[in-house]
Image (tube, rainbow, N blue to C red):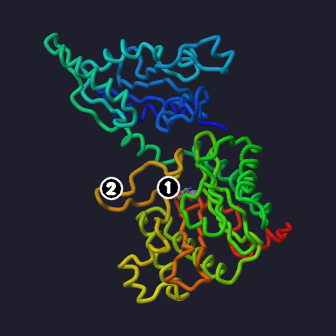
Amino acid sequence: MTIKQAEFKKRRAALMKQVGKSNIAIIASAPQRTRNRDVHYPFRQDSDFFYLTGFNEPDALAVFIPGREQGEYILFCREFDQKKALWEGAHAGLEGATKHYEADDSFPITDLDDILPGMLENKGKVFYPMGKDSELDHKLLEWITHIRKQSRSGITAPGELVSLEHVVHEMRLFKSSEEIKLMRRAAEVSVCAHIRAMKACKPGLYEYQIEAELVHEFTAQGLRHVAYPSIVAGGSNACVLHYVGNNDKLHKNDLLLIDAGAECDHYAADITRTFPVSGTFTEPQRLLYQLVLDAQAAALEHIRPGVAWNQAHEASVEVLTKGLVKLGLLKGRVKTLIKNEKYKQFYMHRIGHWLGMDVHDVGDYKIKDEWRVLEPGMVLTVEPGLYVAADCDSVEPQWRGIGIRIEDDVLVTKDGHEILTHGVPKQIAAIEALMAQCPHE
Ligand code: GLY
Ligand code: MN
Ligand code: MN
């Protein structure tokens, strides 16, 4: 499953239109990063670069010059190297760049310094992701300075650097049907992984053994990369929002919070479920869990076109604060507690984020200081939580050390929304029923 070349072409055409004739856009690939000595981290292409090119190699740079007669899309990349192909496998080379990736022209990346400065001549604006790659930033400024020095020969240098990200990120915020297919697949496989983890869980196992179940399911279904490091947090580890230690033993009376998602051809899933290690919630766990579930339901009611992005968050804050007062974890008037943000002791993050090629995906949340209004094609997470630190002595001991988050991936549709990750049980009875199918003692 993968995005077709025609779609990349459409994206480039949309970009060129916004860049405009007499201007130029430049974007580099991600580098190959060293892990240790001669071992590399698994390569992950820069999301913006991949979005525009579909080209999955390091040492590449794309240039877009709307209206250029010899071709508008130029790809600099590694030349084909027979020895490299033998040791490391296939790479496109200059021929592949034009033939398979539909670049109008391709050049060796090693010739960048000789060729790119000429492309900048007489251009007005350079659309470029400034600050991402300091070496390239430096080179670009040097090239522009060099061109400026030739002004007496009638050549003009670009006078403005414009954020390329701003244009591309706005495009990325709205998912096409091809993109949604990939997100559905990432969600579907991640759903299976969460169910597998729930079934496998029992007291005495270690968090990393549950992580292994997740990895097994992702990999067995062909998704070889996680969208972010899996969080497998037993007991009070769940109160560390981005816990990735995954090293502790699971205890009978604890909850287990799993926040994990696979990546499908550069598109992420991001699911959290929290469930009892033993298969049965204790009473305090049940009460707090139901509260988070109610907060999620309240938030989901605000996910539809035309509703401002912050409404879902505010709905979750209201439900959680009311519930915390009812259960005695907060004391005072709900309105005042919300105004003074007292709930933040237990609910310190926002309701969610955009989801796409990056787990915390790109796109503005506010436009001119106003919260953005939801539109069809946007995908976001809805993930309220409650976290009562183990040493929180302002609450009764029964609540301490409980961390709960429930997270789903939601597509905004014409008529409302669709939950892409509903397949993992989240109602208390459904979780207990699923876990009862397997021995958990
Ligand atoms: N998995 C990170 C998050 O939920 O934001
Ligand atoms: Mn998330
Ligand atoms: Mn998450």
- 3D distance between C-alphas at marks 1 and 2: 17 Å
Residue at position x 68%, y 53% from top?
190
In the rendered image, residue 364, in percent from the top left (x then y), is placed at: 39, 52
Residue at position x 41%, y 66% from top?
310
Vertical side of 281 occupied by 351: above or below:
above
Tell me if 134 is positioned left or right of 81 in this view.
left
Vertical side of 428 occupied by 160: above or below:
above
Picture quarter with the C terminus: bottom right
Query: Neighbour class for label 2 at 10 Å: few (<14), some, many (≥20)?
Result: few
Query: Neighbour class for label 1 at 10 Å: few (<14), some, many (≥20)?
Result: some
Q: Quadrant of ligand 2?
A: bottom right
In the rendered image, residue 153, in percent from the top left (x then y), is placed at: 16, 10
Q: Circle 1 sits in a helix, a strand or a loop, which is it?
A: loop
Tell me if 329 is positioned left or right of 167 in this view.
right
- Circle 1: residue type: Pro
Mark 1 or mark 2: which is in front? 2
In the rendered image, which quarter is residue 74 located in? top left
Ligand 2 neighbours mark 1 (CB distance < 8 Å)? no
Q: Provide the residue designation for mark 1.
A: 376
Q: Provide the residue designation for mark 2.
A: 367
- Circle 2: residue type: Ile
In the rendered image, which quarter is residue 135 located in? top left
In the rendered image, residue 76, in percent from the top left (x then y), is placed at: 46, 19
Asked whether 345 or 151 is in front, the reply is 345
